[in-house]
Image: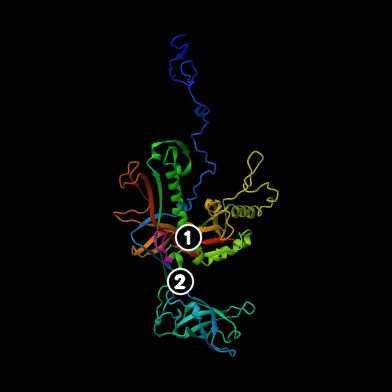
Amino acid sequence: MAGAIETGGLLNFQLQPSAQQITTQTNYINNFDFLSTYLPDTYEKEFERYGNRTVSSFLRMVGAEMPSNSDMVKWAEQGRLHTKYTGVTLASYVGNETTQVLTVPVGQIDPATQPSTGVAGGIAIRVGQTIMISDETAASAFSNKAVVTAVDYPNRQCTVAYYEATQAAYANASTMSIFVYGSEFRKGTPTMAETLISDDSIFSNSPIILKDTYSIAGSDMAQIGWIEISGEDGANGYLWYLKSEHDTRLRFDDYLETAMIEAVPAVAGSGAAAAVSPVGNKGTEGVFHVVGTRGNVWSGGNPVALAEFDDIIERLDKQGSIEENVIFLNRNFGFDIDDMLASQNSYGANGTSYGLFDNDEEMALNLGFRGFRRGYDFYKSDWKYLNDPTMRGGLVGGTINGLMVPAGSTTVYDQVLGKNAKRPFLHVRYRASETEDRRYKTWITGGAGGATTTGDDVMNVNFLSERCVCTLGANNFFLFKS
């Protein structure tokens, strides 16, 4: 046999590797031991059994990121333009009086934000103004119109003279709602004596520092094993020992968003406030906290009927009346809205024209809706964060089913810039200056993998960000809770 060498009565062929995977006499190796003969079949591509595992997308869809060089972000939001008080009481009632003294409850006065008329915390009513007086008792529903003749600011009282000949028969225990609708002065009288101070509300938030790290020993970097990845965060191709670093980065990206959603400020006297680094001790106001505190909260299950959405619309009418709104919701809430809208169609019970009303046998039946209009435009979008079982999905206590966010932007007075500025209702402020950008920092330390900063035989990949979220006009948001 050509190429064979005879030694000791045995024929040993010289091994000649082939350019292709073809079995020949010269490329067969027969000196495997039993430990290496049966090598396992391996897949070099990682199977994505949970699909895209990241949950961040919400703030990128509805907000923006902008720098800030301060440890606190402050802004002013407009207050109400007109004056209305509820729970107002009568000084006395004897029947058919031509004048009356009205007392505004102390709970209606906020010295920090309410208008002032020369006395701190005074009521925003002035002599010469005309007011509407309405009984808050539904059974009576009496009302009067009157002109203000005197105001006692320290005692939160005003004296009014009725335009009607007969005062409404208010009960002694009744409470009234009053609001200013104009003014009236006689000829030749002086101008109005007092002025009103604008009712602006000042809000603030401070950034928190988020950190993460990935570490690998230098010895582990010497043995390379490749893994093919694809899909998540636009990453495609092969990774070796940095596969875990890639996952750390994805996890940190998620935390940058979920921290802005879930964070709460540390209450004075709390354990977090008393803790020291690296725990952190101040917290920050996340979206859920702000909306739950000074926004609108729908509790007791999902709104599943138009009448319930009418209640939401009635509330929006009393707030900013933002035309377009997006509801970011979990799967069950989305199905409830689909079922509610489908029931408005007379054929909805049979499913024949459910969703797209021109369905036929040649097309897939569309059983979902992207939005609807009823006074306002409501669009819905599935929020993976609320469905993910490792995050809010499947929680029993503290369940949040959705968040309604107004679309567009609003104008606020930026305390740092010193001028009015247009901002998205939700946006992130990160700390940055000409020499330091803390939006998303990453750096390598250690003594392996090209790093030469320490004598440790490791490579550390560090991540850091300092940021907070600003929720403008929280009165226009809705939080849907179970």
Q: CA distance from mark 1 to mark 2?
A: 26 Å
**Is residue 264 visible to us here?**
yes
Closest to the observer, 146 or 304:
304
Which stretch appears magenta?
273-281
Closest to the observer, 104 or 384:
384
Number of the front mark, 1 or 2: 1
Mark positioned earlier in the residue sequence (1 or 2): 2
- Check whether the beta carbons of the residues at disc 1 and disc 2 lie within 8 A of each other: no
Q: Main secondary structure of the magenta part?
A: loop
Q: Determine which of the numbered discs, if any, sits on residue 396 in the image.
A: none
Q: Residues within 10 Å of mark 2 (few under 14, many from 20)?
A: few
Closest to the observer, 219 or 182:
219
Query: Looking at the figure, which quarter contains the C terminus?
Result: bottom right
The residue carrying mark 2 is 81
Mark 2 falls on what kind of element?
A: loop
Residue placed furthest toward the right: 350
The residue carrying mark 1 is 287
Vertical relation: 353 (above or below) 327: above
Q: Position of residue 341 (x, y in %)?
A: 63, 54
At horizontal 39% and vertical 84% (from top left) the residue drawn is 190
At horizontal 59% and vertical 89% (from top left) the residue drawn is 96
Left or right: where 398 falls relative to 149: right
**Residue type at the position of mark 2:** Leu
Q: Position of residue 226 (x, y in %)?
A: 44, 35
Does the segment drawn in magenta span residue 278?
yes
Write down the quadrant of residue 110 in the picture: bottom left
